Amino acid sequence: MEVESGAFVEKARAALDDATLQHALKHIKHGFVEARANAAARLPDFEAMRDRARDVKAHTIAHLADYLEQFEANVTARGGKVHWARDAREARAIIHGICRAAGARTVTKSKSMVTEEIELNPYLEEHSIEPIETDLGEYIIQLRGEKPSHIIAPVIHLSKDQVADTFHEHHGRHGFHTRLTERSGMVREARSILRQRFVKADVGITGANFLVAETGSAVVVTNEGNADLTASLPDTHIVVTGIEKLVPTLDDCHLMLRLLPRSATGQDITAYVSFFTGPKRTDDLSGPSSFHVVLLDNGRSDMMGTEFEEMLRCIRCGACLNHCPVYSNIGGHAYGSVYPGPMGAVLTPSLAGIDKAGHLPNASSFCGRCEAVCPVRIPLPKLMRHWREREFERHLSPSGTRWGLRAWSMIAASPRLYRSMQWTASRFLRLIASNGWIRRLPLAGAGWTGERDMHAPAGNSFQHQWRKRGGRR
C-alpha cells in the first residue's frame, strides 16, 4: 500500500490554506453528521444494536479461521472459487490471471477501498487492461488522476465547479462539448458514458461490504446501482475484499445493514442492497458464468491477538471521519493514505508500518467523538494511543517530543515538584496575561496561541483552595 504520510504536516497546512477545500468540507456537518444523528434518533434501539454488532464482529474475528472455511465451502458448493492472497502483490497477480483467462481488455469496477489499498488500477493499466470506475465519485477522481479523500464520499473535497470543469475537459471525446453546471445534467452525461462501458466490459470487479459465511454470499450496498451492473453484465465477476468482512449468518448481516447506512449517510437503507452468491444457474436468464472471490490478508491476520484486533471490527462506514475535528478541517488527502481519519490512523500503521505512518496516530485531539459514533464501538482513541506508545518505544518520535515527555513524567511522578512547577507556571501565565487572556505563549506554546487566545489561570489551585477551606484527605 502506497503511503505518503511522512508529509502529513506540510499537507495539512496546505489544506488549511485551501479556500475551495475548506468550503467543500463544510458539507460534512449537514450531509453526514446531522443526518446520522437524525437517523439514530428515529431508531429507538440504535444503541442496543451497536452493542450487538460489536459482539457479532468480535465473535467472528475470534473464530475467523472457522468462518473463512465455511465461507469458502459454500462459495465452492455454489460454483464459485475463492482465492487467498497474503498481500497486495498476490492479490493483483490473482486478479490479473483471472482477467487474462477471460481475455479481458476492459474491466468495470464498483467502489472498493481494498482495490485502492492494493493499487489495482495502475497494475491493470500496466498490463494493457483498462479499468473503468463506475461509482460516480470514483469515476470523477479517476478522470482527475486523484485518490479518494473519503472512504464513502471520494470527491467530498471537490466543488461542483471543479467537477463541471473535469467533465468538460474529458467528455469531449465522447461527443459532449457543453460545460454543464447543473448536477442533474452532469449525472445524466456521466451515466450516458458509463452505460456504454458497462455493456462492453469483459470483467466486473466489486468489493464487498460483508461476506456471509452460511451462504457464501458477497453483499454490496450502493446508491447508484452500479455494483449490480458491474457484477451481472460481464461474463466474469470478481469480488475483492478483506478477510475481516465476514459475518456468520444472514441475520447478522441484516443487523449490520441496519447500522451501516445510518452511520454512514444517515439513510435508513441504501437504494440498492445486492447479495451475490455464485455464478448464474442453468435457469437464470443472465449473470456471470464465472464467480471469483479474492480474500486479502495484507497484514490483517497480524493484528489478531494484539491490542489492535478490535480494529478488525470496522465496517467502513466513515462515521469516525465525519465527526473528527481534524479530518473535517484538512480533508483526506493530507493523511497520505487511502484510509484517512481516525480509522486510518489505526489501520494504516497496522498495514504499512508505524515507521511509514507515525504522524497519523498523532493527528488526533482525543476528543472521543470517533469512538462515540462508531457503530461497532471500536475504541479508536485507545488504539491510537497504543500506536503512539509503539512509536515512542521505537524512538521514531521527534527528540523534542521525547525529551518533553520524559520531563513531564519526572514532574508528574513527584507531587512536591509538580506543585512547585504548577505554582511557578500559574504565576508566570498570569503575569503575561492581559484582561484575563494570553495572546501569545512563548516557545513551544506559541503554536497553541497562533490560532486562538488562552484563558489565564483564574487563581490558586484546587489543592490550595481545598487546604484553605480546611479540607482533609
Image: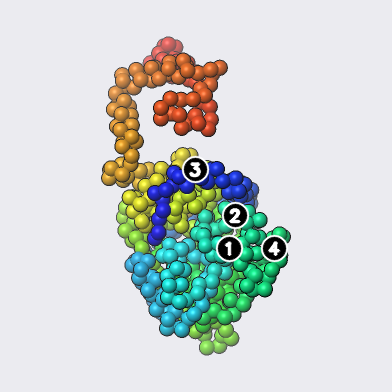
- Vertical order, 199 against 267 (above or below): below
Left or right of 82? Residue 375 is right
* Residue under numbered circle 4: 179
Give the x, y percent position of residue 305: 31, 55
Q: CA distance from mark 4 to mark 1?
A: 15 Å
Q: Please report the residue visible at 46 percent of the width from the left and 25 percent of the height from the top.
A: 441
Q: Please report the residue visible at 52 percent of the width from the left and 55 percent of the height from the top.
A: 149
Mark 1 closeness class: few <14, some 14–19, many ≥20 residues within 10 Å: many
First in residue order: circle 3 vs circle 1: 3
Q: Amino acid at mark 4?
A: Arg
Q: CA distance from mark 3 to mark 1?
A: 25 Å
- Mark 1 and mark 2 residues within 8 Å of each other at the beta carbon: yes
Q: Could you say whether the residue bearing mark 1 is in a helix, strand or loop? A: helix
Give the x, y percent position of residue 406: 29, 32
* Residue under numbered circle 1: 140
Say which quarter of the image contains residue 138: bottom right
Say which quarter of the image contains residue 222: bottom right
* Residue under numbered circle 3: 13
- Vertical order, 229 against 368 (above or below): below
Residue 144 visible in the picture: yes
